[in-house]
Amino acid sequence: MSGPPLPLLVIGGPTGTGKTRLAVEVAREVGGEIISADAFQIYRGLAIGTAQPTAEERAEVPFHLVAEIEPTEPFTVADFMARAQTAIADIAARGRLPILCGGTGLYVRALLRHFSFPPAPGPEGREIRARLEREAEASGPRLLYERLIQVDPLYAARIAPTDARRLIRALEVWELTGAPVSSQSGVDPSPAVRYNNATYLLTCPREMLRRRLEERISQMLAAGWLEEVRGLREAGLTPGLPALRALGYAELFTVLEGRLTLEEAAAAISLATRKYAKRQFTWFRRDPGTWMTWDSPAEFDLFRRHLVRVAGWLRSADRLEKGPWNSLSSTD
């Protein structure tokens, strides 16, 4: 890509910490547009369970990569990168600020480091995938895992023996190319797109986050989450779909099957969500970024004001290499 790097503000962090609210407030003030970095918000029909931005939020600022595909369609990290790169370039070309916001750390890392991936499968690859999917359905993923150990032990060591989706993709790549997937993915040493980005990671104290997560689950159930799942079930969707691996959907399918009460499901979802937030925190700690821990409206507003200033720095030609966004103070 010729020309200067494109400005990009990144807001990541664990679920339930207020990322979307912060991104909306900043975008509204600086003329920004938000790109979702969430693995499940891309799907239609999952508005409540994936905490997609509300109609009011979407009326305030434009969102991208939200409710764009059907839950039956595959969506990979490579797909995310392609769509996100296109959205960022388009937003910047219109003189607005791209704001990447979400809690899927792999998406954020892949975009900023410009991961490279094996090519998408053509007709032959789709036939191979369909055969492997039938094998997984008939015999379970364990046999596929044992096969993967023989052809790509490095990748096999990085995934769970029960992760059918990744097992199928790895074996598909092997059959198509004769090379292990572990040798075909990684960081592109000469990426086509570079960003003048600043990354912020939003969180709050553990007990406060626990309360926020419990309140949000209650609000989602009150808003009709179970009915959302009922509609998916009536449309013929099953919990085995990758799209429905989002938190809570399997538990609510179980409620509809009569094997859990709604109260039991809510407790299970709450526990799973807390564990997921902890994993997100661990993931984001591995990558560069400025952590912002808030526990009061005043602190939240301090961070909003700081990010508004950062937006100006990102757009300023004399700040492209290094900006003073690595610290926060009460004067921001």
Image (spheres, grey):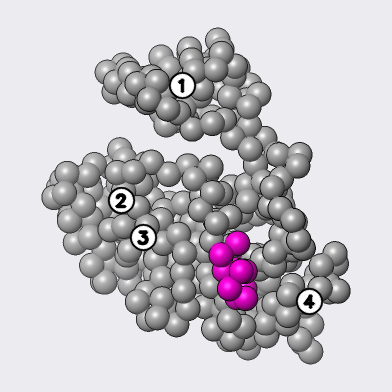
Tell me the amino acid under the disc marked 2: Glu
Residue 161: image location, x then y, percent: 47, 24
Q: Is residue 1 above or below residue 137?
A: below
Q: Quadrant of the C terminus?
A: bottom right
Between 149 and 97, the residue placed more toward the observer is 97
Residue at position x 41%, y 76% in the image: 58
Which element carries disc 4, helix, strand or loop? loop
Give the residue number, with chain letter if any, for mark 4: 316
User: Which residue is disc 1 drawn over?
Assistant: 172
Residue 176 left/right relative to 181: left
Q: Which residue is mark 2?
A: 70
* C-alpha distance separating marks 4 and 3: 33 Å
The amino acid type found where label 3 is placed reads Ala
Q: Which structural element holds mark 1?
A: helix
Pointer 3 residue: 67
* CA gap, disc 2 and disc 3: 8 Å
> Which residue is located at x 38 percent, y 25 percent?
123
- First in residue order: circle 1 vs circle 2: 2
First in sequence: mark 4 vs mark 2: 2
Q: Position of residue 305 (x, y in %)?
A: 67, 85
Instruction: Give the magenta range.
Output: 89-102
Q: Secondary structure at mark 2?
A: loop
Towards the viewer: 76 or 17: 76
Q: In this image, 129 relative to 198: left or right? A: left
Is 312 placed above or below 119 here? below
Residue at image point 38% right, 50% down = 246
